[in-house]
Amino acid sequence: MPELKIIAHIENDFNEKFGIPRQSGLADIESRIIFEPPYRSCDAFRGLEGFSHLWLIWQFSEAMRGDWSPTVRPPRLGGNKRMGVFATRSPFRPNSIGLSSVKLNRIELQSPNGPVLYVSGADILSGTPIFDVKPYLAYTDSHPDASGGFSLSSKEEILKVDFPENLLQQIPPQKRKGLVQILAQDPRPQYQSSAERIYTMSFGGYDISFFVDNNILNVTEIRRLYP
């Protein structure tokens, strides 16, 4: 079998799996794609500036297994029903490969790390290996009339976020919008709905504690993890 080469790693504010958006494009969080030394030639990026969106092909590096199962329990269905692995985007696959569509914000060709891509909308853990970057082509990649299968069987719940101003001010301004978008999508596991439980999510160097009651997510505490 040919070997897949890791060409880059992604860097962002997602330091743990809890809180990462369930799909790409759902939160306006900026990420950097840092390429490995053999792939830092500026010639490899010639023409990329003309595209607004990219496909990232990456490795589920935190979900590597030696075996696989033909069925999985999608969180979208509350973890209570099995579906065929090829009908899901579960990380537990025969090959632990992910695919995400992201917006290309800008390209920094000259940096200490060589060319760096700044993208937004990634649903990828910081440090994840990237196998490839490809341009997104709207005329062939977009299918507005495509059916969504069981993923549309229940409405995606968008929560109202009650974020006290004194707590919100503790978050750097450039991170606030994306953080509120993540919280509004209800980062809790779908099989957990207790109004009494306090959840804590790590994001961008902060621990954000919250509870959900009557479709309102209430932020209760912000704790900085490091200076």
Image: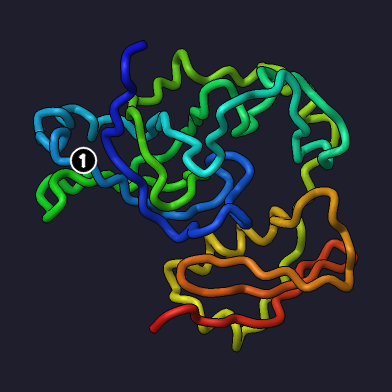
- Side (left or right) of 45 relative to 139: left
Front one among 128 and 48: 128
Q: Residue at x 40, y 54 (%)?
A: 30
Quarter of the image holding residue 59? top left
The x and y percentages for residue 14 are: 49, 57
Horizontal side, residue 42 vs residue 73: left or right: left
Q: Is residue 99 above or below residue 105?
A: above
Please tell me which residue is depicted at 61% across the width and 25% down the height of the picture: 67
Identify the residue position indicated by label 1 in the image. Answer: 36
Looking at the image, residue 149 sits to the left or right of residue 208; the answer is right
Residue positioned most to the front:
66
Residue 62 place in picture, x, y as percent: 52, 44
Q: The C terminus is located in which quarter?
A: bottom left
Pick whichever, 15 or 208, lies toward us: 15
Left or right: residue 80 versus residue 62 is: right
Up/down of 207 relative to 52, above or below: below
Mark 1 residue crowding within 10 angstroms, few (<14) / some (14–19) / many (20+): some
Q: Residue 54: image x %, image y %? A: 38, 31
Question: Residue 75: which quarter of the image?
Answer: top right
Q: Quadrant of the N terminus?
A: top left
- Look at the numbered disc 1 and give the secondary structure of its residue: loop
- Residue closest to the far bottom: 166
Which residue occupies 13% across, 46% down?
114
Q: How many marks?
A: 1
Q: How is the image coloured?
A: rainbow
Q: Is residue 47 above or below residue 1?
A: below
Expressed as whole percent of the image width and height from the top left, the position of residue 113 reads 16, 51
Could you tell me the amino acid type at mark 1? Answer: Glu
